[in-house]
Amino acid sequence: MTITRAIHRAGELIRLIEKGKTGPKQLGGVAPTKLSRTQAAKDSGFSKDQYVTTMRVGNVPKEVLPRARGAA
């Protein structure tokens, strides 16, 4: 597996974690998720810059990834 594919896969996995909600907290309902995307990345040993890069590469469709990698 190439490094680009590994970074892409990490971005896909982080995106599986529900995105945090902003705004006023609602009373009752479902308990909020204790794990955030950023916390998962920190626990995985990613720096803030690595997390941002991983999310950006993870948003690139798989079909475009080989061409994007060749352009770099």
Image: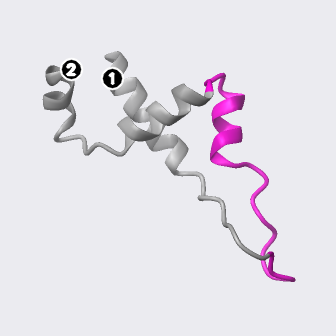
Mark 2 nearby-residue class (10 Å; few <14, some 14–19, many ≥20): few
Q: Which residues are magenta?
A: 25-47
Horizontal side, residue 25 vs residue 67: left or right: right
User: Where residue 33 sits in the image (x, y, percent)?
Assistant: 75, 59
User: Where residue 7 sits in the image (x, y, percent)?
Assistant: 42, 27
Going by the numbered disc 2, the residue's amino acid type is Ala
Measuring 71% from the left and 73% from the top, which residue is drawn there?
23
Disc 2 versus disc 1: nearer the observer: 2
Instruction: Note whether 24 is above or below 20 in the view shown.
Output: below
Residue that badge 1 annotates? 4
Residue that badge 2 annotates? 72
Instruction: Note whether 17 is above or below 40 in the view shown.
Output: below
User: Where residue 13 sits in the image (x, y, percent)?
Assistant: 50, 42
Going by the numbered disc 1, the residue's amino acid type is Thr
Q: Main secondary structure of the magenta part?
A: loop
Q: Earlier in the sequence, mark 2 or mark 1?
A: 1
Q: Is residue 69 magenta?
A: no
Numbered disc 2: secondary structure: loop
